[in-house]
Image (spheres, grey):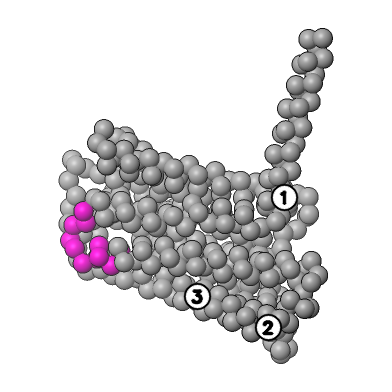
């Protein structure tokens, strides 16, 4: 196997494997929290949903891509491509939308309740989480409905012009107009949500900086500390998304300017566009005490169980 192909395959394999494992652990931790605490806080519900969307993204994009890089062919037929690409488009859209939702919700949470409107909105936040999830799912399912019509299985090893070669599937836009319209629509949608999340994250940073001393003096309670820590986690997630979003869209804009995209460019975009989905759960694990505590408890329980089994086996030998 060629060295470049090996490096590419190992990179995709590590990205997919670590990302799927980390997102699964975050989901399991939140399931445990939900079973023991009866109810998730709004930010925890959003982070849980973000992990689910990122898990879907990695399963429908990185896993087939990795299998293709290692030489597996004819993974999907036309129907399979339509289903996988449709789920991937929805998951990718949900990832940006939910990160934006997380940033906006946290900005409202930490904002000083200066008026009755904002005070009422703060009280309504827990009730708005589920309806917002439902609305985002339906909106993105409707927006991405065109994706299956352009998705087909690769044929005869040829890539027609104005086609996105995903390796395991082709997205054939047939003409330059459809190709550019799709690219511009996706880019504009992403820029709108990224602009909103950057604006709300900037507001959080300004608020925390402006009231820094006051916050340190007043918020020494556990609740206030958790609120500040959650705000910082949200800002870090937004910065992480913005970095990879920028790289992804630089490559995407280049792809819109050429009728046939070189395979190496398409692979680079796949890798960078999936980095957020694979890295964000590690940020959640490292910064969220609830999630970390569940993992520590699970590890401790396994160690205790192994110790007890070892003692039992020694006792049986004696």
Q: At x 46% / y 76%, what residue is drawn?
A: 195
The disc label shown at residue 36, or none: none
The disc label shown at residue 211, or none: 2
Q: At x 74% / y 76%, what residue is drawn?
A: 216
Is 211 situated left or right of 155 in this image?
A: right
Q: Mark 1 falls on what kind of element?
A: helix
Whether 120 is drawn above or below 241: the answer is: below
10 Å crowding of disc 2: few (<14), some (14-19), many (20+): few
Using the numbered discs, state the Cα–Cα distance from disc 2 to disc 1 in whole angstroms: 30 Å
The answer to whether residue 120 is magenta is: no
10 Å crowding of disc 3: few (<14), some (14-19), many (20+): many
Identify the residue position indicated by label 3 in the image: 198
* Magenta stretch bounds: 252-262
Using the numbered discs, state the Cα–Cα distance from disc 2 to disc 3 in whole angstroms: 20 Å
Using the numbered discs, state the Cα–Cα distance from disc 3 to disc 1 in whole angstroms: 30 Å
Tag in front: 2 or 1: 2
Does label 3 or label 1 sit earlier along the sequence?
Answer: 3
Query: How far across and how far down the image is residue 117, in percent?
Result: 69, 87
Q: Mark 3 falls on what kind of element?
A: helix
The disc label shown at residue 293, or none: 1
Does label 2 or label 3 sit earlier along the sequence?
Answer: 3
Can residue 74 be seen here? The reply is no
Query: How far across and how far down the image is residue 50, in percent?
Result: 56, 58
Asked if labels 1 and 3 touch by Cβ distance under 8 angstroms, the answer is: no
Q: At x 50% / y 54%, what residue is drawn?
A: 279
10 Å crowding of disc 1: few (<14), some (14-19), many (20+): few
Whether 262 is drawn above or below 18: the answer is: below
Q: At x 76% / y 27%, what residue is drawn?
A: 307
Query: How far across and how far down the image is residue 108, in percent?
Result: 65, 78
Does label 2 or label 1 sit earlier along the sequence?
Answer: 2
Out of 237 and 39, give the one closest to the viewer: 237
């Amino acid at each position: 196997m060629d060295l470049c192909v090996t490096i590419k395959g190992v990179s995709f394999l590590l990205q997919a494997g670590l990302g799927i494992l980390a997102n699964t652990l975050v989901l399991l931790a939140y399931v445990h929290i939900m079973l023991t605490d009866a109810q998730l806080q709004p930010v925890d519900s959003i982070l849980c949903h973000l992990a689910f969307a990122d898990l879907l993204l990695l399963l429908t994009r990185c896993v087939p891509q990795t299998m293709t890089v290692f030489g597996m062919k004819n993974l999907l037929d036309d129907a399979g491509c339509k289903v996988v690409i449709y789920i991937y488009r929805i998951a990718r859209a949900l990832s940006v939308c939910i990160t934006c939702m997380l940033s906006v919700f946290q900005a409202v949470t930490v904002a000083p309740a200066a008026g009755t409107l904002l005070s009422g909105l703060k009280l309504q936040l827990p009730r708005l989480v589920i309806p917002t999830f439902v609305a985002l799912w339906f909106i993105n399912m409707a927006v991405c409905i065109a994706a299956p019509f352009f998705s087909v299985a690769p044929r005869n090893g040829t890539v027609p012009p104005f086609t996105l070669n995903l390796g395991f599937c082709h997205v054939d836009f047939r003409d330059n107009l459809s190709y550019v319209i799709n690219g511009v629509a996706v880019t504009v949608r992403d820029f709108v949500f990224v602009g909103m999340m950057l604006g709300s994250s900037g507001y959080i940073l300004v608020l925390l900086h402006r009231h820094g001393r006051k916050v340190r003096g007043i918020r020494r309670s556990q609740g206030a500390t958790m609120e500040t820590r959650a705000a910082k986690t949200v800002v870090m997630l937004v910065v992480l998304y913005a970095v990879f979003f920028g790289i992804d869209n630089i490559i995407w804009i280049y792809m819109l300017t050429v009728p046939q995209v070189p395979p190496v460019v398409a692979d680079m975009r796949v890798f960078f566009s999936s980095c957020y989905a694979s890295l964000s759960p590690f940020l959640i694990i490292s910064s969220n005490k609830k999630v970390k505590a569940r993992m520590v408890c699970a590890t401790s329980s396994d160690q205790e169980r192994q110790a007890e089994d070892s003692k039992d086996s020694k006792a049986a030998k004696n």
